[in-house]
Image (tube, helix red, strand yellow):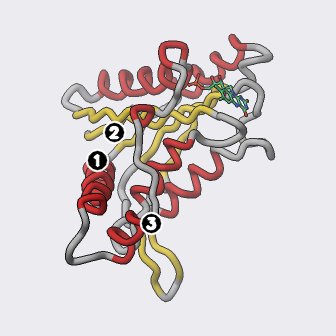
Amino acid sequence: MNILHIDSAITGDASVTRQLTAEITARLTAANPSAKVTYRDLNKGVTPIDTEWFAAIRVGTENPTPEQERHIRVSDQLLAEVQDADTLVIGLPVYNFTLPAQLKNWLDQIARAGVSFRYTAEGPEGLLTGKRAIIAYAAAGTPFGSDLDHASGYVRHMLGFLGITDVTFVPADGLAMDRDAGLARAQAALENIAA
Ligand SMILES: Cc1cc2nc3c(=O)[nH]c(=O)nc-3n(C[C@H](O)[C@H](O)[C@H](O)COP(=O)(O)O)c2cc1C
């Protein structure tokens, strides 16, 4: 088992999602002691896509500039980490009703036409198949799956678009109202995850 453990929270040691992703990863590795874990902390920075990225990755060039080479290196590395993984454990804190920008930047970096998805006569086809994702969601007041939750549905959709359709959420919501109840809900979901 190859696990890709991804955090994106800005809240350091106080982070609920960081605690949950660590617990999920620990459960998986306890049940699969030979599992390899790759850790990626998106809070340390993920280059946003821009005009140079588009030229280098989407258009493609024979003679990339140093800036374009940097984009290719970053995107290739982030994508290789996903390609190598069979299980993704992702921290999804809700900030301003949606996902953190660094998690969006990561999705932008790994969504590559012809590599992680392609268009066929029948429509789009995700190419990152045979993987599952376990996502730790945390929110102070935005109920998981509600109309105000512009995070979980989007992340589920993007992963599905890339071929990762086996997605399980571990939701810790309502933390501002009743923190213990929110954490207990997440704990119950966590214990139901097949290791
Ligand atoms: C910048 C910022 C924006 C936030 N926006 C929301 C929000 O829109 N809805 C919500 O329910 N909670 C919001 N929160 C609270 C977080 O979702 C909550 O603290 C949760 O635990 C975040 O996960 P983390 O602990 O891993 O950072 C926000 C927190 C921060 C720091």
Q: Is mark 2 within 8 Å of ligand 1?
A: no
For the residues labelled 2 and 1, say whether their Cβ atoms are less than 8 Å apart.
yes
76 shown above or below 133: below
Figure quadrant of the C terminus: top left
155 shown above or below 119: above
Residue at image location 43% in from the left, 20% down from the top:
23
Residue type beneath disc 3: Thr
- The earlier-in-sequence mark between 3 and 1 is 3
Residue bearing mark 2: 4
Residue at image location 35% in from the left, 35% down from the top:
40
For the residues labelled 3 and 2, say whether their Cβ atoms are less than 8 Å apart.
no
Callout 3 environment at 10 Å: few (<14), some (14 to 19), or many (20+)?
few
Callout 2 environment at 10 Å: few (<14), some (14 to 19), or many (20+)?
many
Q: CA distance from mark 3 to mark 1?
A: 24 Å
Residue type beneath disc 1: Glu
Q: Is residue 87 left or right of residue 97?
A: left
Residue bearing mark 3: 51
Q: Is residue 138 left or right of residue 47?
A: right
Q: Position of residue 79 (x, y in %)?
A: 32, 54
User: SS class of the residue under badge 1?
Assistant: helix
76 shown above or below 137: below
Residue at image location 27% in from the left, 35% down from the top:
38
Pick whichever, 98 or 168, lies toward us: 98
For the residues labelled 3 and 1, say whether their Cβ atoms are less than 8 Å apart.
no
User: SS class of the residue under badge 3?
Assistant: helix
Residue at image location 27% in from the left, 56% down from the top:
76
Residue type beneath disc 2: Leu
